[in-house]
């Protein structure tokens, strides 16, 4: 019997590090000979998850109990314009109002606006506020914890982390070039590998945005 896609084992942080190390061939049995440490590689993977989230954010909802006129955004909300896409109070959808300091606010209507980094209402709502927003994918808290990035897109995480790995090597190579009598900034193939991997990553992101991809949620059982 074929395994249900809902029961596919999730990729843990430790497994993803191994995959990236195999990809960039930094998998020597002697860890003292690695070009980057596990901590550095985790940093690249964290950047990969953040960048991936900006392209394919999760959609989450945060509930706020009344009354309060200014709501602190959820910690996992992606910063930037359009981060909140729906606000609901007592079954009514409230509209985001864009205005500049010094402008007068409307005296009626269901609206909210950003002020001091907080989602603000003209007066404290008396009912529960539901805020739908674009969220970051969580990063695993330990080696045994799994990524929540969909199975179809794990390749993107791997590619981005590999590109960051080669970017570091390219930076080191460029510094060493300064000590060569006739060193050139474009003579390191490592720098080119970083550019190739980033381009492949961005091409795949664009392709998925154009045609979509099947994103399977996996069980952690």
Image (cartoon, rainbow, N blue to C red):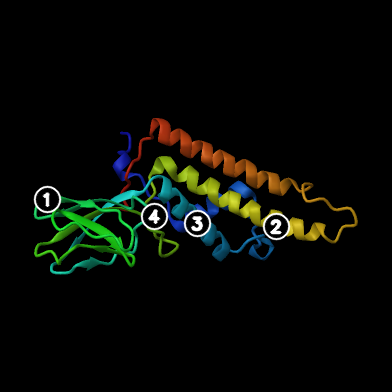
Q: Is residue 60 visible?
A: yes
Horizontal relation, residue 80 to residue 196: left or right: left
Q: State which tag comes first along the sequence, 3 or 1.
A: 3
Classify the position of the N terminus by image quarter. top left
**Vertical relation: 118 (above or below) 51:** below
Cα distance in 3D space between marks 3 and 2: 18 Å
Residue picked out by circle 4: 80
Residue 101 image point, x, y percent: 33, 63
Callout 4–callout 1 Cβ contact below 8 Å: no
| Residue drawn 29% across the image and 43% down it | 6
User: Depth-wise, is mark 3 or mark 4 nearer the camera?
Assistant: 4
Numbered label attached to residue 23: none
SS at circle 3: helix
Q: State which tag comes first along the sequence, 1 or 2.
A: 1
Horizontal relation, residue 73 to residue 151: left or right: left
| Residue drawn 90% across the image and 57% down it | 181
Horizontal relation, residue 147 to residue 133: left or right: right
Q: Closest to the observer: 87 or 48?
A: 87
In the rendered image, which quarter is residue 152 located in? top left
User: Depth-wise, is mark 1 or mark 2 nearer the camera?
Assistant: 1
Residue picked out by circle 1: 92
Residue at the right extreme? 181
Q: State which tag comes first along the sequence, 4 or 1.
A: 4
Residue picked out by circle 3: 47
Label 3, residues with CA under 10 Å away: few <14, some 14-19, many ≥20: some
Residue picked out by circle 2: 171
Q: Is residue 26 visible?
A: no
Residue 106 image point, x, y percent: 19, 56
SS at circle 1: strand
| Residue drawn 59% across the image and 47% down it | 23
């Amino acid at each position: 019997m074929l395994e249900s896609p809902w029961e596919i084992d999730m990729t843990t942080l430790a497994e993803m590090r191994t995959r990236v190390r195999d990809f960039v061939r930094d998998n020597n049995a002697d860890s003292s000979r690695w070009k980057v440490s596990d901590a550095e590689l985790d940093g690249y993977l964290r950047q990969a998850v953040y960048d991936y989230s900006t392209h394919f954010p999760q959609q989450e909802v945060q509930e706020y109990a009344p009354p309060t006129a200014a709501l602190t955004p959820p910690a996992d909300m992606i910063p930037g314009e359009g981060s909140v896409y729906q606000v609901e109070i007592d079954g009514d959808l409230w509209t985001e109002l864009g205005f500049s300091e010094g402008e007068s606010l409307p005296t009626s209507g269901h609206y909210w606006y950003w002020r001091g980094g907080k989602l603000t209402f003209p007066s404290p709502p008396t009912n529960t506020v539901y805020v739908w927003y674009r969220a970051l994918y969580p990063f695993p808290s330990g080696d045994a914890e799994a990524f929540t990035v969909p199975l179809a897109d794990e390749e993107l995480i791997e590619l981005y982390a590999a590109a960051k790995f080669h970017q570091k090597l390219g930076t080191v190579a460029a510094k060493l070039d300064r000590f060569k009598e006739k060193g050139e900034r474009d003579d390191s193939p490592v720098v080119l590998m970083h550019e190739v991997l980033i381009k492949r990553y961005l091409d795949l992101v664009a392709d998925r945005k154009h045609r979509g991809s099947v994103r399977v949620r996996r069980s952690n059982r």
